[in-house]
Amino acid sequence: MGLRPDTRDYAPLLGPSGAPGVLFATGHYRHGILLTPVTAQEIAEQIPTGDSSDRLTPFLPSRFAKTSPVAS
């Protein structure tokens, strides 16, 4: 049985992590098999330039920086 990581909003994390040279491409949950080709293409285009495609905007990890942490 494999792992199926997801996020709070069930959308993948695609783009810069905040650490230099580290990109996220995770959180696809059960849709990973379908989203792998487009994720690979977008991340591969971002690696040499560091520039993010407009198509990745809804999936940027920074979308969680605007929310407060969940209380435990």
Image (cartoon, rainbow, N blue to C red):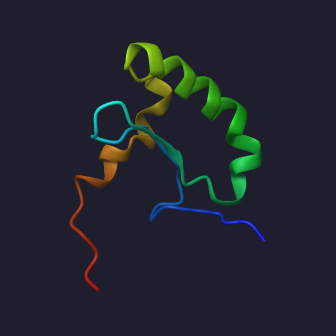
Q: Residue at x 45, y 65 (%)?
A: 8
The image quadrant that residue 68 belongs to is: bottom left
The image quadrant that residue 67 belongs to is: bottom left
The image quadrant that residue 1 belongs to is: bottom right
Q: What is the count of numbered marks?
A: 0
Q: Quadrant of the C terminus?
A: bottom left
- The one of 20 and 13 positioned closer to us in this rendering: 20
Q: Residue at x 35, y 30 (%)?
A: 21
Left or right position of 1 against 15: right
Direction bottom: furthest residue: 72
Q: Position of residue 33 (x, y in %)?
A: 76, 47
Q: Residue at x 37, y 46 (%)?
A: 61
- The one of 4 and 71 positioned closer to us in this rendering: 4
Q: Residue at x 40, y 13 (%)?
A: 49
Vertical side of 12 occupied by 69: above or below:
below
Vertical side of 39 occupied by 13: above or below:
below
Q: Position of residue 57 (x, y in %)?
A: 41, 34
Q: Position of residue 35 (x, y in %)?
A: 69, 41
Left or right position of 4 against 21: right
Q: Position of residue 37 (x, y in %)?
A: 72, 32
